Amino acid sequence: MRAVIQRTDSASVSVNHEIFAETGKGMLIFLGIEEADNEDDIAWLCGKIARLRIFSDHNGIMNLDVQETKGEVLIVSQFTLHASTKKGNRPSYIRAARPEKAVLLYHLFVEKLQELIPTKIKTGSFGAMMKIKLINDGPVTIMIDTKHKE
């Protein structure tokens, strides 16, 4: 499971030219799920994200997590995070989970993270063609991979 976490001033996802979800200060999480992922990956990643100290304290030092700042969270599924460009110029998505597995793990991820974060989590529309807008704060962008525990 891979996540790209961006600290945001605001973020939104649109489907068919209509805003589907939007947030203010907080984080936008792009989530990629691969065939080998399971509930252990979800638990580890959710815990890491909930405790990730990427928000500034009163001294301007990144020392606070999303729970402490009551930041908002938007989660968007993104199978392309598992693209392999090893051979040729056309990415392969062979490691990405099939939609029927990915959608179940995606919803479990959202539920588990919601248990850890007090603000209502918002999501994109799984499998839809989405347009994402964000104002990245910092910019701060963090990548986490559960298979490498980093």
Image: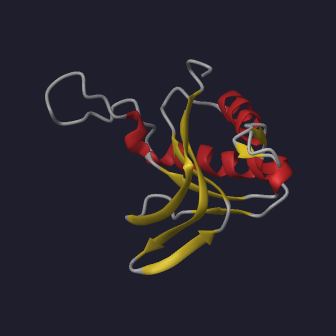
Image quarter hosting the C terminus: top right
Q: Identify the residue at the far bottom of this view.
A: 18
Task: Write the residue at 32% across / 36% down.
Answer: 93
| Residue 5, above or below 27 | above
Q: Is residue 60 above or below residue 76?
A: above
From this viewpoint, is residue 117 visible? no
User: Given the current orientation, which residue lies at the most extreme top position?
Assistant: 148
Residue at image location 80% in from the left, 46% down from the top: 57
Residue at (41%, 65%) from the top-left corner? 130
The vertical placement of 77 against 19, above or below, is: above
Whole-percent x, y for residue 40 in the image: 70, 28
* Quarter of the figure with residue 118: bottom right
> Looking at the image, how many numbered discs can be counted on the residues?
0
Q: Position of residue 64 (x, y in %)?
A: 80, 43
Q: Is residue 55 shown above or below 121?
A: above
Left or right side of 132 for 141: right
Percent position of residue 90, x then y: 17, 36
> Residue 138, how many percent across, how many down?
57, 49
Residue 143 visible somewhere in the drawing: yes
Q: Is residue 145 left or right of residue 116?
A: left
Frontmost residue, 52 versus 127? 52
Which residue is at 27% across, 33% downward? 92
Residue that protrudes farthest toward the left in the picture: 88
Q: Is residue 10 left or right of residue 128?
A: right
Asked which colour scheme the image uses, the reply is secondary structure
Q: Quadrant of the N terminus?
A: top right
